[in-house]
Image (cartoon, rainbow, N blue to C red):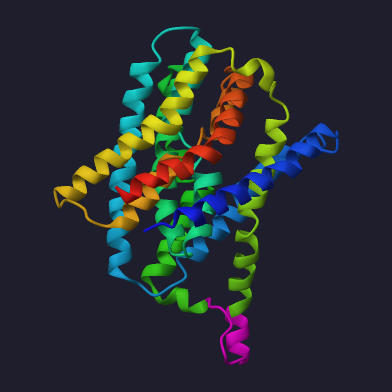
Amino acid sequence: MIDISILFSKVMLLLLMVVPGFIMAKCKLSTPGLCKGIANLILYVAQPALIIKGYVRDYDSEVMKRAAWVFVFALIVHLLFTALAFTVFRKGDEGRRRVLRFATVFTNAGYMGIPLICAIFNDEYAIYASIYVIVFNIFCWSLGSFIYTDEKKYISLRKMFFNPATIATYVGLLMFITPLNRLIAPLGDTHTLADIARSIPYDLMDGLQALVAPLSMLLIGLRLAEVDLRGAFRDRQLYVYLVLRLLISPALVWGVIRLCMLAGIMTDEVVMVVILLSAATPAATATSMFAEKFDGDSVYASKLVSISTLLSLATMPAVALLLYL
């Protein structure tokens, strides 16, 4: 079971990592294109390294069983969030309604969920967190594109199944189910040439994975500095969204999984922890990225991402208390 004090300390650490980016932006120390460069570094380098490193272990059928359950419940979660999004946000300005629906369905499981889960637990949990991100990408490049455009032509099968996170997962799975994982290993007690050769790629991935959390939070800090927080809370729909995204949605996820556990359908606590923490993260950074891509209300999207991220630092430990029920 998760230790709430450890979760709180890790979330607070993430909060402190936001501060440098916020200060940089306010002091005009950031340069044009910095945010995009950081996002690309996380997406194409650091996060894939984190995911692949999680699979560097001998094959274990129990791990595959857990990963399968994570996939199933991640599908259920996204379908549940989709139903909530289209039920709750049916009126109001069309541009904002699209943003609210997208931000309700998609959480920041990649940039915030994975580093948080791996910081609290061990590298094995990167496997399960990456499975959630696979489902996220399947929905994001299909339903997500449709939410912003109402056009099926923008649904991209290639991006659904071939993007940095999913490709890293495919590579990791290949290493996990074959002896290839033995070509990479941490340096042990013996220091033969073969041992050193195996440790170099492992240490490289270890160093790159350490960048995910600080760079993700630095990016959020840079974006947060762009939002006018003084006028943000005049929007009534914002309050509805924040309660729905940060409290009601994860509570419903907990209820669904707990019922399955009580019925004996699935009894693995690890699956519960990974799914609940992934579902409890704030609006996905893709909310604003897709708004810009499809000419949506990108300013409003950035506001939702920034404010939900800020408040999630308090709500995520509160949601985690459900694990004790």
Q: Residue at x 64, y 61 (%)?
A: 208
Q: Is residue 17 left or right of residue 283?
A: right
- Residue 289 seen anywhere in this rendered image of the structure: no
What is the span of residues highlighted in magenta in the rendered image?
Answer: 184-198
In which quarter of the view is residue 101 placed? top left
Q: Residue furthest left?
A: 263
Give how far across and how far down residue 278 sits, in percent.
43, 44
What is the count of numbered marks? 0
Q: Residue furthest right?
A: 28
Image quadrant in which the N terminus is located: bottom left
Q: Main secondary structure of the magenta part?
A: loop
Give how far across and how far down residue 155 sits, in percent.
43, 29
Q: Residue at x 41, y 77 (%)?
A: 179
Q: Is residue 299 above or below residue 200?
A: above
In which quarter of the view is residue 256 placed? top left
Give how far across and how far down residue 211 sits, in percent.
65, 56
In which quarter of the view is residue 111 placed? top right
Nearest to the observer: residue 12 or residue 82: 12
Q: Is residue 145 left or right of residue 256?
A: right
- Residue 183 seen anywhere in this rendered image of the structure: yes
Q: Is residue 325 left or right of residue 96?
A: left
Q: Is residue 99 above or below residue 74?
A: above
Q: Residue at x 35, y 27 (%)?
A: 82
User: Is residue 197 shown in magenta?
Assistant: yes
Nearest to the observer: residue 13 or residue 222: 13
Give how far across and how far down residue 142 sits, in percent.
41, 31
User: Is residue 100 shown in magenta?
Assistant: no
Nearest to the observer: residue 31 or residue 25: 25
Q: Residue furthest top?
A: 92
